[in-house]
Image: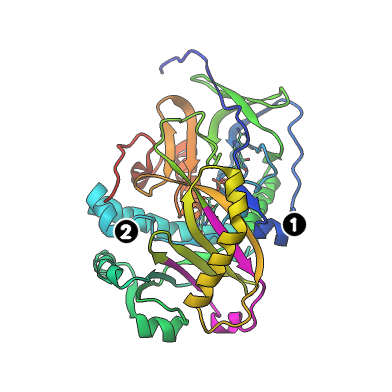
Amino acid sequence: MTSLAPSTAGTKAHLMDLHDGTPFWPRRDGLPAVHNPLRANETCDVVVIGGGITGSLVALELTKRGADVVVLDRRDAGGGSTSASTAMLQYEIDELLIDLTKAIGGEQAETAYRECGRGIDLVERATQEVGHMCGFRRSPSLFMAVKAGDVHTLEQELSARADAGFDVKWLNADELRSRWDLVGQAAIESAAGGSIDPYLLCHHALVQATKRGSRVYGRSEAVAFEFTSRRVTVHTSRDVTVRAKYAVFATGYEVNQLLPELPIALHSSFALVTQPIANLGQRYPNGMLFWDYADPYIYGRTTDDSRLLIGGNDEPYRDPLRRRRALPTKARALLATIERRLPNLSDVELGYSWCGTFAETPDGLAYLGGHSRYPRCQFALGFGGNGITYSALGAQYIADALLGPGAPPEQHIFRLERPIVKPS
Ligand SMILES: Cc1cc2nc3c(=O)[nH]c(=O)nc-3n(C[C@H](O)[C@H](O)[C@H](O)COP(=O)(O)OP(=O)(O)OC[C@H]3O[C@@H](n4cnc5c(N)ncnc54)[C@H](O)[C@@H]3O)c2cc1C
């Protein structure tokens, strides 16, 4: 075995502005569990840095397989991007299958789509494991063309997905209106899709991991690391350490200190949730989710308490203050779009609005797995619109990599050290 000299890498950084305004989930769920800061040295099999939906699913999977796990979060658990997410669960990646096929080949592109579909199953399985539905619902997903000029591309996409065996059907404008009350040019209706309350699932997963012996520490920042061939030592903000056989970085978008070379682009997305809408539950008994093929696009879903949760009008992440100021205007614009898109709904009133940061990768694929610079470490970075299905996949790949039988071949598609390809 190669003996590595101890190396250190600091991550001390200002807290990134992950969101602003009034994200819905913490407002609705409160603080389901409180995790005290780490105040004494710890040792464990695996230290998970980040207690959002990704870190919590990683901890859930690792503890299920018998590992002794410590979770650290510099905020309250779930207080990062997880609390701001609209949490649509999709097999569809930000990049169209036809574009991803050109970039990485048909076999890998289809596998990536299929793996995201499996991610939905894994999220459902996690809800069963924690003994709480956490608002999980399976619903068809509608991918809509809102401009006539985009219909042809959508037709090509439909045929690629159908050829690949995905359960898809075409809806013209009339069918879209009569089946879903949605106004658009056409849509691909996919059977696979779902939604969740990710904040609640995150907390329940951490509680379940705790019942299996894991320790979870909030307000505990990992500020420096020593990597050797035998262990990883994490130094925290209170001058205490966690010594572990392995480390998993589930730090969301705040990973740039360790991996500055990752070609990610930060964006701001704006979101709102309506007040409960009468009859929404009857109109969509199994829920509904949709997203546009447009730039900028909007996306939306129903919630289990009869609201619409809408996001979009994205822009490049620049100045958090400017973003905060833009929020009321952006929220009004989103609401107006929804009234046009779903004209049959009456009494659509704003509940809460917020904005959040999210990261895009050039190919729309997450970064899941190890990195040659960091022995004994795994990264679960679910960047892109499918962040949460990637979180669930990452948890499986990483548990397989660390505890056996080894990461599955599909993980290779999401490896960190892959060439940068940008589908056209
Ligand atoms: C507006 C919006 C809409 C979205 N919609 C969707 C959607 O519809 N579907 C979907 O799948 N995804 C969506 N996403 C993306 C999704 O929310 C994210 O992919 C997901 O929440 C990421 O979870 P995470 O646990 O990886 O990150 P986070 O929730 O940010 O958790 C990472 C945690 O790591 C902690 N941390 C970071 N650095 C350190 C450190 N040094 N020491 C200790 N702790 C540290 C942070 O405090 C944080 O709590 C959306 C995001 C936004 C903002």
Q: Residue furthest top?
A: 5
Which residue is rendered at x = 55% and y = 57% of the image?
270
Up/down of 9 relative to 117, above or below: above
Whole-percent x and y of residue 277? 64, 78
In the image, taking residue 82 as reference, residue 216 lies left or right, namely right
- Looking at the rendering, the stretch of residues picked out in magenta corresponds to 269-291
Q: Callout 2 environment at 10 Å: few (<14), some (14 to 19), or many (20+)?
A: many
Local SS, label 2: loop
Which residue matches tag 2?
96
Local SS, label 1: loop
Mark 1–mark 2 CB contact (< 8 Å): no
- Mark 1 Cβ and ligand 1 under 8 Å apart: no
Q: Callout 1 environment at 10 Å: few (<14), some (14 to 19), or many (20+)?
A: few
Q: Amino acid at mark 1?
A: Gly
Look at the image and say whether residue 336 sits in the magenta stretch. no
Whole-percent x and y of residue 164? 26, 64
Marks 1/2: CA distance? 37 Å
Q: Quadrant of the N terminus?
A: top left
Up/down of 330 relative to 375, above or below: below
Could you say which is closer to the camera, residue 17 or residue 38? 17
Q: Quadrant of residue 106?
A: bottom left
Whole-percent x and y of residue 272? 60, 63
Q: Is residue 129 visible?
A: no
Which residue is rendered at x = 42% and y = 83% of the image?
177
Disc on res. 94: none
Could you say which is closer to the camera, residue 47 or residue 382? 382
Could you say which is closer to the camera, residue 321 or residue 174? 321
In the rendered structure, which disc, 1 or 2, sits on the residue that comes first in sequence?
Answer: 1
Disc on res. 30: 1
Q: Quadrant of residue 385?
A: bottom left
Q: Amino acid at mark 2?
A: Leu
